[in-house]
């Protein structure tokens, strides 16, 4: 079946192994990795950027394989998790950029269609996150206050 907003098909690509193995060559213990995650979160990095920094700078291939926790779980335990899930905040940032573009280019019809699509993605994702309990039940996306959400 095709994707919802594009005509692309399939999910081809590389995948992580089904059973993550603990690499023995990593010099860090699980507690040290958790401390690194918290330290990197204080520098305003998103969870995915923290994972990339750990991989590239510290040589930690997989936080989950070594600590048996996801990065976001570690951040929640230390009360430094972001208020919005990362996918939601990136969509909101995209919407803000597109609204700024549409203010300058009022006759951009494809841009207006793109704005509608991004808004529907945000609403669909909000519905999912409300169901999973990651967003409050009374949370509502307002494009006039979008800049305040991402800040």
Image: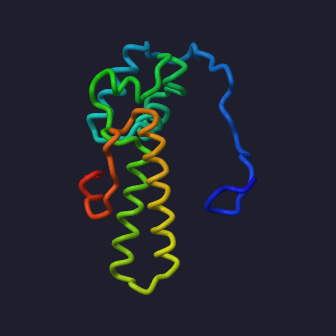
Q: Is residue 15 left or right of residue 57?
A: right
User: To which quarter of the image does residue 20 belong?
Assistant: top right
Residue placed at 56% from the left, 16% from the top? 25
Relative to the observer, which residue lies in front, 132 or 51?
A: 132
Q: Nearer the viewer, residue 144 or 138?
A: 138
Q: Residue at x 53, y 26 (%)?
A: 62
Q: How many marks?
A: 0
Residue closest to the eye, 136 or 40: 136
> Where is residue 93 drawn, in percent x and y?
37, 57
Vertical position of residue 92 compared to residue 98: above or below: above
> Residue 30: image x %, image y %?
43, 14
Q: Residue at x 34, y 26 (%)?
A: 76
Residue 15, placed above or below residue 65: below
Q: Is residue 83 above or below residue 36?
A: below
Q: Residue at x 30, y 39 (%)?
A: 83
Question: Can you say whether 6 is above or below 67 in the image?
Answer: below
Seen as rendered, the residue at the extreme front is: 138
Residue 67 x/y as whole percent: 47, 16
Query: Is the image coloured rainbow, by chain, by secondary structure, or in one colour?
Result: rainbow
- Name, please, the residue furthest toward the bottom: 107
- Residue 10 point in image, percent of width and height: 74, 50
Of 25 and 65, the residue lying toward us: 65
Q: Is residue 6 left or right of residue 151?
A: right
């Amino acid at each position: 079946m095709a994707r919802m907003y594009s005509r692309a098909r399939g999910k081809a690509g590389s995948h992580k192994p089904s059973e993550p193995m603990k690499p023995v060559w990593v010099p860090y213990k699980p507690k040290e990795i958790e401390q690194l995650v918290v330290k990197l979160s204080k520098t305003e990095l998103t969870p995915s950027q923290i994972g990339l920094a750990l991989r590239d700078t510290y040589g930690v291939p997989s936080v989950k394989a070594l600590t048996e926790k996801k990065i976001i779980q570690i951040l929640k335990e230390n009360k430094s998790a972001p208020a919005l899930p990362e996918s939601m905040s990136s969509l909101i940032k995209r919407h803000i950029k597109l609204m700024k573009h549409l203010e300058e280019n009022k006759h951009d019809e494809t841009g207006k269609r793109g704005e509608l699509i991004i808004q529907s993605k945000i609403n669909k994702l909000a519905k999912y996150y409300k169901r999973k309990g990651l967003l409050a039940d009374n949370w509502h996306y307002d494009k006039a206050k979008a800049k305040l959400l991402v800040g």
